Amino acid sequence: MTTSGAAGRLVVCPTPIGNLEDVTLRVLSALREADVIACEDTRTTKVLLDRYGVSAERVRYDAHTERRVAPRLVERMRGGTVVALVSDAGMPLVSDPGLVLVQACMAAGLEVEVLPGPSAALAALVASGIEASTWRFVGFLPRKRGGLVEVFGSPEVVVAFESPRRVGASLAALAEVDPQRPVAVCRELTKLHEEVVRGTAASLAARYADEAPRGEVVLVIGAAAGIDADLGPALTALRRLVDDAGARPRPAAAVVAELTGTSANALYRALTETN
């Protein structure tokens, strides 16, 4: 709680992604000790707080209000207030609001403490059964085909959120590029109707073509075959030059290779194999 004369701090608190029993003891302790809880949705957070008998001032802090609310919270922390930041589910800042407040606290020299906890991305990655020595989280999948193709060409396993209504179309786009790519569709993780469906891009595209999955969905997509992970950033740059700027593949590959120290032939081969 507030200590006279002492600077406050921000505590980033991950919350359950479905099952309220997944909240950690440290998070409950932080919520009970906080003077203010900054919530993505105060009504959603109230369910968790009521379950565990936590009472504290709740302030709305979402994507629409964060630039207005963050300076006010920082000013209160300067005066000794302890603020706990939560999102509706999972870790704040991971496809959720919070970055503006964290950066504002850092700029003001205020302490920022981050507690570990539930993560839909990590749960889905492990549940997928897909080997992932390296992987990347991309948030929500892009809606445009060019963006999808770029993500699907990743030399790393991809973990992504997706709207249930778009799962079929996104998987169909992947199946056009690589029908045998391993995929896991993870829905309603940690909830009563949790389901993990594993298969190829083609088989799952067919499954969800006419009937969208229900609930929140996380996709885990196997790495594009035959692409060296070290080429990842250079290949992304090359693909943008070719797809977005209309550059010719071979000359573009030579330029990107010179700038990044990679092989022009390897870049060109990776580009043609994934397009």
Image: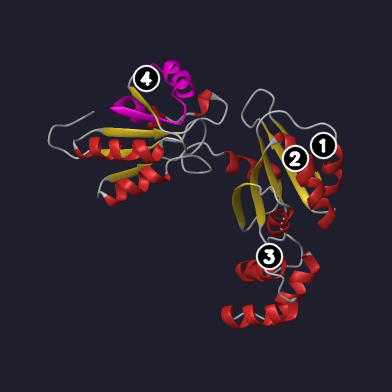
CB atoms at circles 2 and 3 under 8 Å apart?
Answer: no
Any part of residue 229 in sight: no
Please determine whether, in this image, residue 182 is positioned above or below residue 196: below
Three-letter amino acid code at disc 2?
Val
Kindly check if marks 2 and 1 are in contact, taking CB atoms under 8 A apart as contact: yes
Identify residue for label 2. Answer: 167
Which residue position holds label 3? Answer: 244
**In the rendered structure, which disc, 1 or 3, sits on the residue that comes first in sequence?**
1
Residue 88 x/y as whole percent: 50, 30
Give, as a three-letter code, the residue at label 4: Val
Q: Of the residues tagged 1 and 3, which is closer to the observer? A: 3
Q: Residues within 10 Å of mark 4 (few under 14, many from 20)?
A: some
Residue at image mark 1: 208
N-term-proximal mark, 4 vs 1? 4
Q: Which residue is the site of mark 4? A: 54
Tag 3 secondary structure: loop
Vertical comparison of 247 with 151: above or below = below
On-image quarter of the C terminus: bottom right
Task: Work out how far the residue at label 2 is from the one at label 4, CA to CA, in angstroms.
Answer: 37 Å
